[in-house]
Amino acid sequence: MLLQGKKIILTGGSRGIGKSCVEYLASQGAKVAFTHTGTGNSAAVESFEVELRSKGCDVKAFAVNLSEVASFKEKISQMTDYLGGLDGLVNNAGVTSDNLILRMKEEEFDKTLDVNLKGAYFFTKECMRSLMRSESSASVVFMSSVVGVMGNSGQSAYAASKAGLVGLAKSLAKELASRQLRVNVIAPGFIQTEMTGVLDESVKKSYMDNIPLGRFGEAVEVAQAVTFLLSDMSRYITGQVLNINGGLYI
Ligand SMILES: NC(=O)c1ccc[n+]([C@@H]2O[C@H](COP(=O)([O-])OP(=O)(O)OC[C@H]3O[C@@H](n4cnc5c(N)ncnc54)[C@H](OP(=O)(O)O)[C@@H]3O)[C@@H](O)[C@H]2O)c1
């Protein structure tokens, strides 16, 4: 198992890519503390926890709103107490608010940047001391997007937040390498989740027409890459962006 004994925090583990990551990381032997907003489908989160525990996995959900930086200290301390340390962090939670720039409202822009970039920044900052104490090769993964590396009409705020994560990760990779702490980015293309489920059929078709592998991605395909970047198999990889997009952006 690739993550045997590793203690991992993952944000946004209640749905989509994050949920698949929680399942996959736990199946690889990790102990996982994952977050959800606490304002979504809490019953579904609870039954997800129960299901995984019945399979022998060590996972626990915590309610955290990434817009509430002041709450991070207490929440992260609860999570690291549960885990008994920290070896890896996956900043996965994210939101989209798509609009043309002429129609974009300041509050929509702020919400996207607050959760996707500011939230990830300060959540990572609060985890840092525990990660530095890790006795294994500690690793941080940021979930960016193909849109953050290639841009997309109508998604300028989202793209800005996701491009910001790339600059953040590359800077942290340089800042933290002397502590043997690695920082990488995953940039998924079109992955089938609730976030992409709401898109117009015409938008989906235009994506599909540009994906050389001829299909949308599955959440587990991202989870497998996250596992690799958290594992000791990637111990000489830092500051990189791993594109998982079926060739949509090459
Ligand atoms: N799906 C794709 O094709 C795709 C492509 C590229 C990048 N991504 C990125 O991959 C990540 C996961 O995407 P997804 O499609 O799995 O999204 P999703 O299905 O919409 O799930 C979003 C997750 O983030 C959590 N979340 C939302 N707002 C939050 C907040 N304010 N504070 C804390 N947590 C919050 C949600 O918790 P609740 O359940 O409690 O709401 C949920 O767990 C995102 O960062 C997204 O930008 C996705």
Image: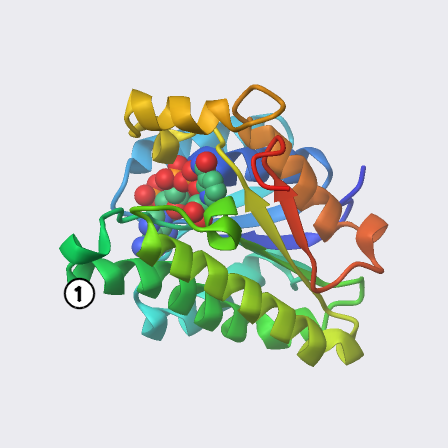
Rendered location of residue 125, percent (x, y)? 52, 75
Please say whether residue 160 is visible from this viewpoint.
yes
88 vs 170: above or below: above
Q: How is the image coloured?
A: rainbow
Task: Say which element carries label 1.
Answer: helix
Instruction: Tell whether 107 sits left or right of 88.
Output: left
Please indicate whether residue 16 sits to the left or right of residue 1 in the image.
Answer: left
For the question of whether residue 26 can be seen, the reply is no
Tell me if 139 is positioned left or right of 185 in this view: right
Q: Please name the residue that numbered disc 1 is placed on.
A: 106
- x%, y% of residue 224? 68, 36
Q: Nearer the viewer, residue 236 or 71?
A: 236
Residue name at image x 81 percent, y 37 percent: 1
Which quadrant of the figure contains the C terminus? top right
Residue shown at the point (40%, 61%) measured from the top left: 160
Question: Does label 1 point to a residue whose CB lies under 8 Å from ligand 1?
Answer: no
Q: Residues within 10 Å of mark 1 (few under 14, many from 20)?
A: few
Say which amino acid is labelled 1.
Answer: Glu
Q: Which corner quadrant of the image does residue 198 belong to? A: top left
